[in-house]
Image (cartoon, rainbow, N blue to C red):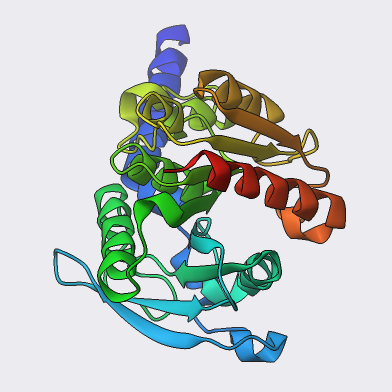
């Protein structure tokens, strides 16, 4: 009887592991939570331009270009794994207030962008966004700030490890998907079955730009320790800014002191850039 129970438990566990393996995409990406736009930058009093970006594998990405008067630089913003660019307009307003142009871009499968999200696909999306800025807006890497939040920080870090921007900002992100998954699903062999890497800590080894890490001790989705480990892995010059609040409300633009600290960091990178 005992062996029958053991077999039942083993088969049940194997079934759970197999199911998690098969549905990984739906655990990493949430493009359908809000396909429609909640607003446009115009609703926030921002002048903007609708932009279409072509990827190397023939997807079309939707983006918003939000210019600033006498811009001090340009921010390329990569959002998290849920929602779309219409939920990130506050970032564009913050950066415009600091004197920076902003490109908000939706990954493939998000918002009005075509395709289906994948790790390799999001990297290609990052390349397409950078290429558009260089070719269409004559933005130099030395003037480009890469800002990523949550999943988007892993995408931005991947890009910054290959082309040195003026600065890289990592907001509320993880060291890697397997690291985070192993903590969330402690009883499952996540590191063995994960088809995703998004290894932010590994990418940091190749990042030569100044790095700012933003994280809250009260982050309820990605533990604060991930931010600390990323800061430790980053090269100098680097800075850590401790936020407050949960993962989905502890945003840098919500407090003037945090915005001021971000602006100061970006100004210092301008002094050190060629």
Between 65 and 31, which is closer to the camera in this rendering?
A: 65
Which residue sits at x=78%, y=42%? 243
- Quarter in which the C terminus is drawn: top left
Where does residue 207 sit, x and y in percent of width and height?
A: 40, 32
Which residue sits at x=52%, y=51%? 148
Which residue sits at x=38%, y=25%? 202
Number of callouts in the render? Answer: 0
Is 235 displayed left or right of 123 in the figure?
A: right
Which residue sits at x=47%, y=43%? 273
Question: In the figure, residue 94 lies in which quadrant?
Answer: bottom right
Question: In the figure, residue 47 lies in which quadrant?
Answer: bottom right
Where does residue 42 sit, x and y in percent of width and height?
A: 63, 91
- Quarter in which the N terminus is drawn: top left
Q: Is residue 16 above or below residue 23?
A: above
Between 180 and 274, which is closer to the camera in this rendering?
A: 274
Q: Is residue 247 visible?
A: no
Between 119 and 208, which is closer to the camera in this rendering?
A: 208
Where does residue 85 sit, x and y in percent of width and height?
A: 53, 72
Is 252 displayed left or right of 105 in the figure?
A: right
Q: Is residue 92 visible?
A: yes
Is 185 displayed left or right of 112 in the figure?
A: right
Q: Is residue 225 above or below residue 135?
A: above
Where does residue 81 sit, x and y in percent of width and height?
A: 50, 56
Question: In the figure, residue 253 lies in which quadrant?
Answer: bottom right
Residue extending farthest to the left is 57
Between 49 and 193, which is closer to the camera in this rendering?
A: 49
């Amino acid at each position: 009887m005992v062996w029958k129970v053991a077999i039942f438990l083993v088969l049940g566990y194997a079934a759970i592991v197999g199911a998690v393996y098969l549905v990984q995409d739906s655990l990493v990406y949430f493009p359908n939570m809000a396909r429609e736009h909640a607003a446009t930058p115009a609703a926030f009093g921002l002048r903007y331009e609708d932009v279409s970006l072509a990827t190397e594998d023939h997807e079309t990405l939707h983006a918003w270009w939000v210019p600033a008067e006498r811009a001090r630089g340009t921010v390329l913003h990569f959002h998290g794994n849920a929602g779309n660019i219409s939920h990130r307009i506050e970032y564009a307003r913050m950066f415009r207030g600091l004197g920076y142009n902003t490109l908000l871009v939706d990954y493939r499968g998000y918002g009005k962008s075509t395709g289906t999200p994948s790790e390799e696909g999001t990297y290609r999306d990052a390349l397409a966004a950078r290429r558009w800025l260089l070719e269409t807006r004559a933005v130099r890497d030395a003037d480009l700030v890469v800002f990523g939040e949550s999943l988007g920080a892993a995408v931005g870090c991947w890009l910054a490890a290959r082309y040195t921007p003026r600065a890289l900002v990592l907001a509320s992100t993880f060291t890697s998907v397997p690291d985070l998954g192993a903590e969330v699903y402690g009883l499952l062999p996540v590191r063995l079955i994960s088809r995703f890497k998004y290894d932010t800590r590994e990418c940091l080894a190749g990042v030569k730009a100044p790095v700012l890490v933003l994280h809250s001790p009260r982050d309820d989705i990605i533990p604060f320790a991930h931010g600390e480990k990323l800061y430790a892995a980053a090269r100098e010059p680097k800075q850590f800014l401790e936020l407050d609040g949960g993962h989905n409300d502890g945003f840098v633009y919500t407090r003037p002191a945090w915005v001021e600290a971000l602006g100061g960091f970006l100004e210092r990178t301008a002094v050190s850039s060629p």
